[in-house]
Image (cartoon, rainbow, N blue to C red):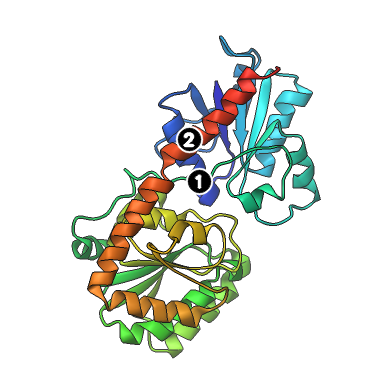
Amino acid sequence: MLYVTNFNPRFTGVSATAAAVLAAQSRELDARLVGKPLPDCPAPLSLARALQRSRHAPQGLPFAIWHVRRNAEMQAALLARDVLRLPVRIVFTSAAQRRHSAWPRWLISRMDAVIATTDAAATFVPHVRAVVPHGVDTARFRPATDRAAAWAALGYPGRSGIVTVGRIRPEKGTDLFVRAMIRALPGLPDTTALVVGRAKPADAAFLAALQAEVAAAGLSGRILFPGEIAAPAMPALLRGASLLMALPRYEGYGLTPLEAMASGVPVIASRAGHFDEFIGTTAGHVVAQEDWSAAAEAAVALLTDPGRHAATAAAARTRAESRFSIDREVSGIRAVYDALWQGPS
């Protein structure tokens, strides 16, 4: 029996990874979602119901596993194991490539097993049982048979699109993307850039400044801010895009470039997260941190060379399928579960 927690009502990058993994895990394990709904996953149980169901060990197993990914979820699992003394063990996935603050460090120290998403992330946490990169559902994220038609179906102007996805804030490098697009779009007729994501109230002034910068450049009709796009609509958006750009100043892992690659979309990214490993030498281009000018130049060079773009798009899909599929991630996680179940209870 596996319980996967999701206590965040918003669909974040962590939510996306949990959803993709749980949807696949449900095909081979008695897996239950606890907390808030996730797309393509079983209907969630309440925390109270999950605690009640965890009172007894599953048939044939010494304990249930609770797989957690956030502070509040670690706390709930510790309540189950250490306060209520239920037969459960806790697995935590860590993607952060920086030192955690004191409270999460203590919580992580209490986990039975930690799965790091990268070798770098593994250096910041204890109890690492395995390094398992996040994967992408390559059936859900797949290339369009006709990219131009897929873009037209989205209803945005132009004949092609460049997309960035993520929270609108300085850490995500939204301003770097905007500057890159102001530099690149004059050389890319009929191309529209989309800033997909929302700004929290604290970042409202940051967003307003970006929109003013776009307006001053005369590109308000070509650099658009459509807001957050619901998870079910994301595959169609990426299938229509010609390029995804990700220029964060910090990223723990970053799943959207993988989703783009699986969709046959080349990626231009800054040297953050796991982007170097994703892209390699074939699926796009990696630029130095903050180098929006190099990102702009790379975008123009790629999108004005149809043959190169087609080859890069095909290589992106191949690399996502062969190295970063969701099945590889699920297999790596299952090995950690099995080691716990087979070890001392």
Q: Tell me: residue 2, above or below residue 115.
A: above
Quarter the N terminus occupies: top right
Amino acid bearing label 1: His
Q: CA distance from mark 1 to mark 2?
A: 9 Å
Q: Nearer the viewer, residue 121 or 29?
A: 121
Among numbered discs 1 and 2, the one appearing first in the sequence: 1
Residue 156 can be seen in this image:
no
**Residue 113, picture quadrant:** top right
Please give the name of the residue rendered at 37% of the width and 73% of the height, measured from the top-left corner.
193
Q: What secondary structure is found at the residue carrying circle 1?
A: loop
Residue at the farthest top position: 59
**Residue 106, picture quadrant:** top right
Q: Tell me: residue 183, above or below residue 303.
A: below
Location of residue 286 in the rendering, given as x and y in whole percent from the top left corner: 48, 69
Please give the name of the residue rendered at 48% of the width and 53% of the height, measured from the top-left corner.
255
Question: Which mark, residue 134?
Answer: 1
Amino acid bearing label 2: Val
Q: Nearer the viewer, residue 300 or 204?
A: 300
**Residue 243, picture quadrant:** bottom left
Q: Nearer the viewer, residue 37 or 330?
A: 330
Location of residue 304 in the rendering, given as x and y in whole percent from the top left corner: 27, 79
Query: Circle 1: is it few (<14), some (14-19), or many (20+) Cα within 10 Å?
Result: many
Tell me the residue that label 2 is attached to: 330
Q: Tell me: residue 43, above or below residue 243.
A: above
Location of residue 44 in the rendering, given as x and y in whole percent from the top left corner: 50, 31
